Amino acid sequence: MAVDLHVHSSASDGTDTPSLVVEKAAALGLTALALTDHDTLSGIPEAREAAARFPIELIPGVELSVDHAGVKIHMLAYFLEPTPGPLEDRLAELRTGRTFRNKRIVERLNELGYSITMNDVLRHAAGDAVGRPHIADALVEAGAIENRSEAFVGLLGDGGSAYVERDRLTAIDAIALTTESDGVASIAHPLTINADAATLRTIFEDLRDAGLAGIEAHYSEYSPTIRTQLAAVAADLGLVATGGSDYHGAGKPGLRIGSGRGDLVVPDSVLEGLRRRRP
Ligand code: AMP
Ligand code: ZN
Ligand code: FE
Ligand code: FE
């Protein structure tokens, strides 16, 4: 029995609606799906309604971009509610920060000669967490580039000519807020963290001591060998080896719910492991 604990919908920068991702996951026979949109829980009610029609469990989640010791980390938080709460309230502030940042990115693009407007960007966003992928979509529509990924090379990617920083929580604060919200946190795609193996392990240990529950070992873009190595590190540190596809619909072509690039399997025991870590 398999699950997928990392999926995006049109509530953030995925292209499928929350109900469609649930329907696809159910059709594939997954027993559980975590909807983990960036900085928003607004897709959860629709996803839950869809999940009630199929033999699949919907785990409400979110993906946060956080800082720790000078490096950027993506963190998945699970078992949150789309109602007021410690972390939930902070998400609204993070989305406001996105709005300011998006405007500044568009201004930079205009200075660089790309004539797109915020309205062009917003036309590509169905939800309330708008970001660089939607800016990329506007650039594609304007004929400036071919696809989303191209925008991240040199232009919108970290350090790119139109890149603008945005407010982030620290990893420690994100974990504390998640715990206060009765949730659990796992580090998403841990090898994206810009650090050597020894530093990475220290980061995992520091965050585990701050209440981190897991690391995403079974990630769609990692080889079976890397997944096994990360799962061993997780076991060694007393962390849950979580997993997911990072499905974004047409936003990340070739990635499928549940199976990723074809070879991903996230056992449902992972979800049981996370449940046991709930406060
Ligand atoms: P933002 O949330 O505005 O900071 O944008 C970050 C999001 O853009 C990531 O979470 C990905 O979904 C997407 N993204 C990052 N890098 C790329 C890339 N090279 N190609 C396509 N999408 C990307
Ligand atoms: Zn995304
Ligand atoms: Fe991510
Ligand atoms: Fe993601």
Image (cartoon, rainbow, N blue to C red):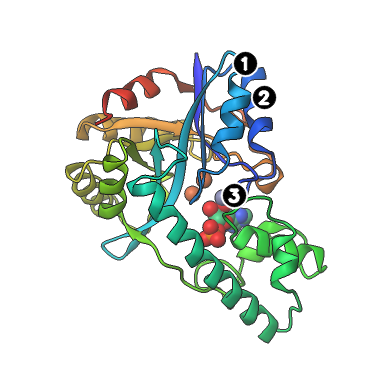
Q: Position of residue 253 (x, y in %)?
A: 69, 43
Q: Position of residue 68 (x, y in %)?
A: 29, 59
Q: Which residue lies furthest to the front in this view?
A: 84
Q: Quadrant of residue 148?
A: bottom right
Residue drawn at (35%, 31%) of the image = 241
Q: Where is residue 4 in the image (x, y as percent from the top left)?
A: 51, 28
Residue drawn at (78%, 70%) of the image = 144
Q: Is mark 1 on a helix, strand or loop?
A: loop
Numbered mark located on residue 23 in the image: 2
Q: Is mark 3 on a helix, strand or loop?
A: loop
Please name the amino acid that badge 1 sits on: Phe
Marks 1/2 in contact by CB < 8 Å: the verdict is yes
Q: Distance between the residues labelled 2 and 3?
A: 18 Å
Please tell me which residue lies in front, 235 or 6: 6
Residue carrying label 3: 12
Residue 74 can be seen, yes or no? no
Q: Is mark 2 on a helix, strand or loop?
A: helix
Q: Quadrant of residue 250?
A: top right
Residue carrying label 1: 54
Sequence-first disc among 2 and 3:
3
Residue 221 can be seen, yes or no? yes
Distance from mark 3 CB to nearest ligand 2 atom below 8 Å: yes
Disc 1 packing (10 Å; few <14; some 14–19; many ≥20): some
Residue drawn at (50%, 23%) of the image = 3
Please name the amino acid that badge 3 sits on: Ser
Q: Distance between the residues labelled 1 and 2?
A: 8 Å
